[in-house]
Amino acid sequence: MTDFEDSWLSLDPLPTDPMAILARWLDEAFAAGGQANPHAIALATGSPDGRPAVRMVLCKAVEAEEGNLVFYTDHQSRKGLALAALPYASACFHFAPQNRQACLSGPVEPTSDEESDAYFASRPVESQVGAWASAQSQPLGSRDELVQRVAAVAARHGVPERGSEPSDRVPRPPNWGGYRLRAQRVELWHSRPGRIHDRAEWQRTLEPAAGPWAAQRLQP
C-alpha cells in the first residue's frame, strides 16, 4: 500500500514498512503547520542500574530506507554518558494536530566524524559557539558566567556571538556529535472516535543484518 492517508492504519493487511509511513507523517506535519517542532522527539535512555531518563531533542534525519533516526548532542551530557554506558534508546514523536504518534526503540551508535562535521558546519554560528561555551549538563554558577563564556568563544574564533549563518571558523568540538538510533520496534498510533484508536507495531531483527519488518495490530 502506497497511499498513506488517514484510513491506512484501519485496513488489513497492514503496510510492510512503518518508516515510510513515519517519514510521510513528518512531512505532512511540517506542511500542515500548527506545531512548532514536528521533528521534536521525547528521547528516553536508561542507566546500567535501571533508572530511566527522558528529554526532548530534535530528530535531524529520518532514514526511512534504513530504519534509522539521527540526532546530535554533547557526548559528555547526561544523555551522552547514558548512551555510552547503555547504547539503547526509545524515541517518541507526537503529531498533535494530526492526532498521530510514533514510537521507536533500538540500539544507538555514534555517527561518523564526517557526518558530525558536516552537520555542525551547517548550524547557525550562535549554535556553533554555544556548543563550545556550554559544558552541557554540568553545574553553572550564574547566567552571567555562561554569557561570558559565549563571548570568549566568539572572540577566540573571530565570529559574532549571534547569527543565522554558519561559520567555517568554528570547528566541531571533539565531544559533540551525532547518534543513530537503529529501530528494532516501531509503533504507530492514530486517534479515532470513541477511543477505538488504530494502533500497530512492527518489529525486525538487526543482526547479523537488518531483516524484514513483521507487523501486528494492537488493541488500543
Image (cartoon, grey):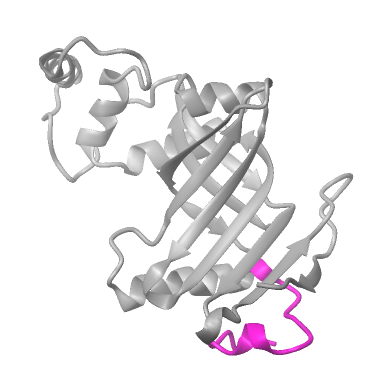
Q: Could you say which is closer to the camera, residue 148 or residue 174?
A: 148
Q: Could you say which is closer to the camera, residue 216 or residue 182?
A: 216
Quadrant location of residue 52?
top right
In the image, which residues are magenta?
A: 1-19
Whether residue 114 is visible here, answered yes or no, is yes
Q: Could you say which is closer to the camera, residue 197 or residue 37?
A: 197
What x and y, as percent, mark residue 77? 45, 23
Position above or below: 214 against 92: below
What x and y, as percent, mark residue 80? 52, 26
**Residue at the extreme front of the image, as rendered:** 194
- Give the position of the C terminus as an image quadrant: bottom right
Position above or below: 202 against 40: below
At 60% from the left and 43% from the top, the residue drawn is 180
At 33% from the left and 58% from the top, the residue drawn is 37
What x and y, as percent, mark residue 9? 64, 82
At 67% from the left and 69% from the top, the residue drawn is 18
Is 124 contained in the magenta span?
Answer: no
Position above or below: 125 against 99: above
- Give the position of the N terminus as an image quadrant: bottom right
Q: Could you say which is closer to the camera, residue 23 or residue 54?
A: 54
